[in-house]
Image (cartoon, rainbow, N blue to C red):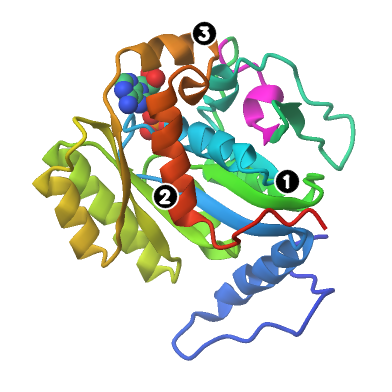
Amino acid sequence: MSEGEQQHGEEPKLQPGMHPSFISVLKRRESIKHNLSRIKHRIGVYSAKGGVGKTTVAVNLAYALSARGFRVGLLDADIDCPNLTMFLGIDQQMDVSGFPLKPLIKDGIKVASTAMIVDDSKRPIIWRGPIIVKMLYDFFENTDWGELDYLVIDLAPGTSDTPLTIMQVLDLDGFVIVTMPQRISGINAIRSGLMAKRLNASVLGVVENMSNGTPTASTMEVVSTLGTRLLGTIKFDPAFSEYSDKGQVPSAHSEEVREAFDSIAGALITDAKPDTA
Ligand SMILES: Nc1ncnc2c1ncn2[C@@H]1O[C@H](COP(=O)(O)OP(=O)(O)OP(=O)(O)O)[C@@H](O)[C@H]1O
Ligand SMILES: [Mg+2]
C-alpha cells in the first residue's frame, strides 16, 4: 500500500498542535498496525549509545522468550550496520525476488535483517535516511511474520531516522533500554528513554549490561529519571565477544546467563502462558 492510502479502520485524526504533514505518519501507523496485527507484542531494545549490548540483549531475550514456549521474531532494525545475523551465525540470504519477504528461521525464531539482503561486510550499506526508512517499512508491511507472540526489535544507536521511525509508526509495547555501568552510558540511556517518552512510547525497563552484578548509581539514575524499573543485570563476561564472533548465543552456553535473561523475559511478559491458539 502506498503512503497516504487508508484501507483499514477509521481515518486517523490530527491531535491539537500536530503539524498537518503528520497525517501521513498517522496513516502509516494505522496501516502497519493492521499488517502486524497477528503479532501480539512488539518490544524494542534500544540505547542511543553504540556498543552497550543492544544486539546481545535482543538476541538473548528472544531466545529466553522462545524457551518459555512463545513464538518469537527478531528484527534487525539496524538497517545500515546490521549485526544480528553474525551474532546468530546466519549466513543465508533472504529471497528478495518478490514480496512478501520471508524471515529466515534460526532455532525456531523468525529473523529478518538487511544483512540477509546485502552482504554489507563486502559492500557497505550507504543509504540516506529515506531509503533506510523505506527498508524499515518493508520489514513492517511487506514481510510475512505470520503469527507471533513477540517481535523483538534490535535498534540502531542514535536518536535519528531508525529509532524515530520506529517510535512514530510502530504500535510498540515499549522499549527495553540497555545501559552499561559507566556514567556516559547512563546519560545516553536517559536521552534514549526521554526520546521514547516524548514520542508516547513506553519504557518497559532498564538492563545494565557488562555489569558486575550490582547496578551502579548511574544505572539507578536512569531507572529513576525514566520512572521505570530495573529489569536485570548481565555480567561482563569476556566469552561474549568470542560467542558473537562464532555466531553463538551466550545464553545457550552458560546457565547463569540463561537464567539472567529468563528473569528479564519473566519481568517483561504479560501473558502467563504461551498462547498457541
Ligand atoms: N555482558 C557482556 N560481556 C562482555 N562482552 C559483551 C557483553 N555484552 C555484549 N558484549 C560484547 O560487546 C560488543 C558489543 O555488543 P553489541 O553488539 O550487542 O552492542 P550494540 O549496542 O548492539 O552495538 P551497536 O550500537 O553497534 O549496535 C560485542 O562484541 C558483544 O559480544
Ligand atoms: Mg547492535
Name the spot of residue 87 as percent of width and height, x first. 53, 20
Residue 166 painted magenta: no
Q: Which residue is drawn at 17% across and 53% down?
A: 220
Q: Give the side of residue 256 with respect to residue 99, left or right.
A: left
Mark 2 vs mark 1: which is more N-terminal? 1
Name which residue type carries label 1.
Answer: Asp
**Residue under label 2:** 160
Looking at the image, which is closer to me, 134 or 195?
195
Q: Residue at x 50, y 47 (%)?
A: 162
Residue 216: tell me if it is visible: yes
Q: Give the side of residue 117 with respect to residue 63, left or right.
A: right
Mark 1 vs mark 3: which is more N-terminal? 1
Task: Examine the rendered structure and indicate whether residue 142 appears above or below residue 202.
Answer: above
**Residue under label 3:** 246
Q: Give the range drawn in magenta.
A: 111-121
Name the spot of residue 247 as percent of width and height, x first. 55, 14
